[in-house]
Amino acid sequence: MSNATGWFLGHLRRGGSFLVVGGLGFLVDAAVYNALVFWGGHGPLFALPLVGKIIAIAVASVVTYFGSRLWTFRDRAGSQTLRSFLVFALINVVAILLQLGCLGVSRYVLHLDSPLADNVSGTLIGQAVATVFRYFAYGRFVFKDDRQGAEEAIAEIS
């Protein structure tokens, strides 16, 4: 098998499991957000949708961390350190800002505040943007492949 084919198949497998984990995180995010903001019409955080989204993403991030660590990047999970967890948290702060940006534009620029508008902008679009960012950032900075880094360093020397 060529290096390009192996690379592609590796990303296809890892990307598929990442999407399953992300799908679970998406469901958790949507459920928590809708409960906080729209429960019974106007939930306890209806007037503070960005706070509701931060809480929802934080809960979903715990789910996706363990899914990523135990399944998607299981071959790289042995070298987890406090540093890698802190980098994970930082990446999720950036991802939260991406999602909040999508929700904020919908709520405060377009003045859309229905459950449908919030779920499309903050959960669907925001989550899609944040998921692409997380996939590449997790693989590069959190769940590093030490063997790949060593192979690249050897190739540069040769």
Image: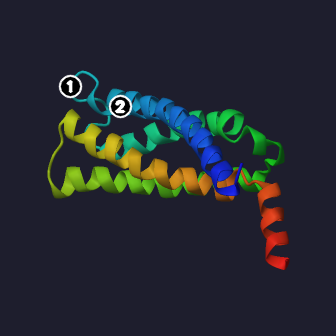
Residue 51, compared with residue 67, is above or below; it is below
Horizontal arrangement in the rendering, residue 49 relative to residue 129 (left or right)? left
Q: State how far apart marks 2 and 1 are (Cα).
A: 10 Å
Horizontal arrangement in the rendering, residue 53 relative to residue 151 (left or right)? left
Q: Nearer the viewer, residue 89 or 2?
A: 2
Judged from this view, the residue extending furthest toward the front is 1
Query: Which quadrant of the view contains residue 27?
Result: top left
Q: Nearer the viewer, residue 49 or 157?
A: 157
User: Percent from the top left, x then y, of residue 10?
Assistant: 65, 45
User: Percent from the top left, x then y, of residue 25?
Assistant: 49, 34
Q: Quadrant of the C terminus?
A: bottom right
Whichever of labels 2 and 1 marks the residue nearer the N terminus, that label is 2
Judged from this view, the residue extending furthest toward the top is 40
For the point 44% across and 37% down, which residue is it? 56
User: Percent from the top left, x then y, of residue 137?
Assistant: 59, 57
> Which amino acid does the dot numbered 1 rest on?
Gly
For the point 32% across and 37% down, which residue is it? 45
Q: Is residue 92 visible?
A: no
Query: Which residue is labeled 1 in the image?
Result: 41
Judged from this view, the residue extending furthest toward the bottom is 157
Query: Which quadrant of the view contains residue 113?
Result: top left
Horizontal arrangement in the rendering, residue 62 relative to residue 85 (left or right)? left
Query: Which residue is labeled 2 in the image?
Result: 36
Q: Nearer the viewer, residue 96 or 130?
A: 130
